[in-house]
Amino acid sequence: MRLLRRTELLALAATMALSMAAKASDFSEPWKNADRALVVDAYEYNSIDWAQIATDKRVVGFINKASDGMPPPYFCLGDDTEVKLCKALWKRHAVTRELFQTRRVVAKALGLKWGAYHLARPGNPVEQANNFLDFAEPAPDDLLALDIEGNDPSQWMSLDDAEEFVRQVHRRIGRFPVLYANGKTAQYIADNSYRYRLLSRLPLWYARYINDIDVHFPMGNWQGYALWQFSAQANCGRFRCPYRVAGTPNDIDVNVAPTDAATLRAQWPFGGLIDVPPDYLASIPLPISREAGLAGNVTITYASVAAPPTFEEMVAALGTRWSRFRDGFRMPVVKTVPRRPGFGIVQYVAWKRTEQRSPAQLDAAFAAAADPLSTASTELDRGQR
């Protein structure tokens, strides 16, 4: 009886160990895995104790809020109230930027990877991208992120404008930002990936405050997340929190990576596009009959298809076609036609027929040219002359 109880206890312990391992997968409470790297992201009102953060060796990076929409107007105009508000916005802007620069120096001195994110607002996406880059002044190893809080264009940047924002960032620095989005927005982008060809291919910074995202993650478009923001004020309080980083308040945002610290450091700052898997592009399943499907044991065959062109390839192709279309309307300029009195169509034809270009030879060719039209009026004109 004692041996049986010991066996049962061992089986129970093994079951619990397997259960904990399953819960600690990349899509289910990965922060419980001690080898998973963590990243803290903050904005200007989060208090940070850097000495305490450095004690948590799992924290690899720190992402700080940079710009918010458009910068305040440079000149303060209007009545006294408007001028005071304008000056207050400029003061906040200056203090926020100084804090941003200070935090970057401290974080890098502690060996942390640095990143910056832009809170996207409605408005000019190109100018917002310029504001973001001018504010953050990113180094080549600094992560950049576009924060899209929702899919309501009246409150946040529209997804169409976000595409242009991403293009402008790439035009200026030659790399792409990471996309920060919640579950609903990320799923919408994935469902409309044909429309949002850039957003759907950016590395995903996924915001979802639940323990298990396996059935919620937009796996059809992204095969995994770059970062998962799993802890924030929404699910972290005084008495319960998924994970507490020393030296940070309860409302701090904490993110987990699906890799260990060394791998995350090697991948940082991302900056590229995520390609669709080759097998997804290279073939499509051929349809089968209903009878064969119900019978089972069906071998699925695939038809080869051409991979869709990349954005750069489409731009190059369209540029070439436009050049040909434009050149078709350009008339050739003849610069060698002799300019002299009485040089008409007959003389032009004679000039084109001869390959001699000296003035004497041209005069001889013109004199030998006959009038191709001979009518009564031309004969009468000749007789009068």
Image (cartoon, helix red, strand yellow):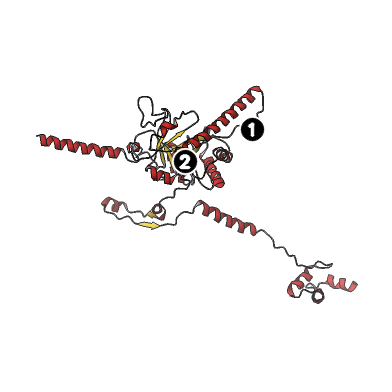
The reply, left or right, for residue 84 in relation to residue 18 is right
Secondary structure of residue under mark 1:
loop
Residue shown at the point (23%, 36%) measured from the top left = 16
The C terminus: image quadrant: bottom right
* Residue marked by disc 1: 74
Do we see residue 52 in this rendering?
Answer: yes
* Residue type, label 1: Tyr
Evaluate if marks 1 and 2 touch, with contact meaning CB atoms under 8 Å apart: no
Q: Residues within 10 Å of mark 1 (few under 14, many from 20)?
A: few
Q: Residue at x 10, y 34 (%)?
A: 2
The quarter in which the N terminus is drawn is: top left
Image height of 43 relative to 263, above or below: above
Crowding around mark 2 (Cα neighbors within 10 Å: few <14, some 14 to 19, many 20+) is many
Residue 219 in view of the camera: no
Out of 229 and 142, give the one closest to the viewer.
142
Q: Position of residue 305 (x, y in %)?
A: 42, 57
Of pointers 1 and 2, the one earlier in the residue sequence? 1
The residue mark sitting in front, 1 or 2, is 1
Can you tell which quarter of the image residue 11 is in?
A: top left
Instruction: From the viewer's side, name the closer residue of 261 and 363.
Output: 261
Q: Which residue is drawn at the image coordinates 55% and 32% (left, top)?
A: 98
The outermost residue toward the top is: 80
